[in-house]
Image: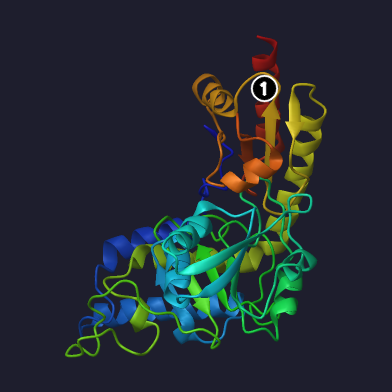
Amino acid sequence: MIYLDNAATGGSKPQKVLEATLSAMKYLNANAGRSGHRLSFLAASEIYLTRKILNEYFNGFSLERVVFTQNCTHALNLAIFGSLKEGDEVITTRTEHNSVLRPLYALRNSGQITLKFVDCDFQSVSAKDVEKVLTDKTAMVAIGGASNVTGSENDIGGIGELLKDSKAVFLVDGAQAAGHIRIDMKRQNIDMLCLAGHKGLFSVQGAGALLFSEKVNPRPSVFGGTGIDTFNENMPDSYPEALEAGTLNLPAIISLKEGIRYLRENEEYIWRKIINLSEYLTELLASRPYAKVYSIPNACGITAFSHAEIPSQELASKLSEDYDIAVRGGFHCAPLMHEFLKTEKWGLVRVSLSHFNTKKEISALINALDEISLS
């Protein structure tokens, strides 16, 4: 199969990531922090090293404020439900994924928060856009680093600068952006960063993370064993244990460590190749009379387009069934973005690239689309 659905999950993993995952599953079946034997200590050491590399790569605030989650959705829920309180005002944008929108809707619909939306400017959001709706009552600004529909980057650096002296917490959904664009929590004044390991960070599925500053102290939303403070009826007061109830996914966490190491060692090559492939794909699609392209070349490697006659989900199915090419059709869990783009009827086909893809694979996609359009 030609896999061009990397924005959903990375289709190819570096060899060291696969080896580390398999080794953990074969030789490190132990529960970190739950026992005093050698394997338990070794598991705890691997988790510590992964926290350390995450904190270093994203210039976080401390190892204790790096919390592992199941995925980015889990991290976002932890950040949103754990930080907001009744009466808070929250600003978000029309570029957001449902992983941001639905937790906020749940709080708004139950009367706990008020919610404001920032409109897009050519698919992205600037600091000036946020400033228009920012007030002294704003408790949180929640925004994605990049759109999962078009790949357009939001101005997280400018927004962070805007919020630097504000009481508002700056929450960034890094699901699509992390690993593709530079994210520096301290420099960009990001208070909470939510990550998906299995996309641009090259881990296997099952490892996400929440990194947060001293400006915010999230409350736990999952309760259970932590390996410490056993006789306390409540969750421990200290991080990360307060937010990490239950057994962590050790093989996925170890794979995340190796994924970030691979990224750190190769990021210039990775980023340059993705941009080059994105430019190549966008240029070829834009020259086709049947295609309307909604993306410009971008670091996330995402190109969204519509077909003049074929709904996106039908076209994606044809590519899979007849040509063994994986793309994604539909609405990509981003309803407000499709309303803004006026694509809520048929959706868009999203082609998302990694540096493991090739121009030959892109040419095969274009040839398949040409054949489908002529039939």
Depth order, front residue of 319/348: 348
State the residue at coordinates (75%, 21%): 290
36 lies above or below 353: below
272 vs 53, left or right, is right
Depth order, front residue of 103/135: 135
The residue wearing badge 1 is 369
Q: Quick one: label 1, few (<14), some, or many (20+) residues within 10 Å? A: many
Quarter of the image with the C terminus in it: top right
The mark total stands at: 1
339 vs 275, left or right, is left
Residue type pointed to by label 1 = Leu
Rendered location of residue 145, percent (x, y) = 65, 62
Determine the image quadrant of residue 186. Answer: bottom right
Rendered location of residue 105, percent (x, y) = 48, 58
Rendered location of residue 116, percent (x, y) = 62, 63
Depth order, front residue of 233/48: 233
175 lies above or below 159: above
Rendered location of residue 22, percent (x, y) = 35, 58
Determine the image quadrant of residue 368. Answer: top right
Determine the image quadrant of residue 118. Answer: bottom right
State the residue at coordinates (34%, 90%): 237
- The colouring scheme, among rainbow, by chain, secondary structure or one colour, is rainbow
State the residue at coordinates (33%, 80%): 44
